[in-house]
Image (cartoon, rainbow, N blue to C red):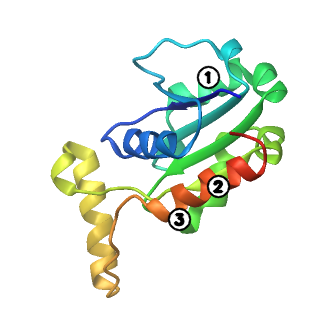
Amino acid sequence: MSTAIIYATVHGSTEKAAKMLCDKLRDAKVFDINRDAFDLDGFDTVIIGSYVRMGMFDKTIRKFVLKFYPVLMKKKTALFMCSIMPENEEKYWHNNYPPQLLEKSLKAHFGCEFDRKNYRGFEKRVAKSITKRNDEKGIYPVYRINEKSIIQFGKDLENNGLS
């Protein structure tokens, strides 16, 4: 059973998470939707991953899901996101993907690496605002990819016949 992991990344967290997940699965291949060519016909399972930016998944990922929706509905599917706000996970899913795809897919949140040095312009101001707001509340989260979530997701995929 072959698996395609298709992802979009801006600062590298989603790419890192996709590759970590690939290492946990048998017969899986990783594709950056903005760089790599791939054909869904060669895969039994499709896993789609995106970063979250201002509540939205990557535009290319969203277009891909809409364009290939009929194909995805016939395949085994799973979804993951990388974001610094896990408390908004359900809202992000429902604002970005069709309900039927969400219902049939395993889903996971992998966290996100967050380093303000990687950001420029408007993104840097938003990042500073988020961390300042948390600092004022006395919240000092560690922003990183949650490897335990990736390991568990890999096990869930295997247990559900998706890998």
Q: Nearer the viewer, mark 2 or mark 3?
A: 2
Q: Mark 1 or mark 3, which has the lower sequence index?
A: 1
Cα distance, mark 2 to mark 1?
26 Å
**In the picture, which quadrant includes the N terminus?**
top right
Q: Residue at x 23, y 56 (%)?
A: 115
Which of the 4 image quarters holds residue 75?
top right
- The residue that disc 2 covers is 155
The percent position of residue 147, horizontal first and vertical second, equals: 44, 60
Check disc 1 and give the amino acid type. Answer: Phe
Q: Residues within 10 Å of mark 2 (few under 14, many from 20)?
A: some
Check disc 2 and give the amino acid type. Answer: Lys
Q: Is residue 40 above or below residue 159?
A: above
Check disc 3 and give the amino acid type. Answer: Pro
The answer to whether the residue labelled 2 contacts the one labelled 1, judged by CB atoms less than 8 Å apart, is: no
Q: Nearer the viewer, mark 2 or mark 1?
A: 2
Nearest the viewer among 43 and 36 is 43
- The residue that disc 3 covers is 86
- Viewed as shown, does residue 110 lie left or right of 89? left
Q: Mark 2 or mark 3, which has the lower sequence index?
A: 3
Cα distance, mark 1 to mark 3?
24 Å
Residue lying at the far bottom of the rendered structure: 138
Residue lying at the far left of the rendered structure: 117
Nearest the viewer among 25 and 137 is 25
The percent position of residue 91, horizontal first and vertical second, equals: 65, 57
Q: Which mark is residue 64?
A: 1
Q: Which mark is residue 15?
A: none
Q: Residue at x 43, y 46 (%)?
A: 20
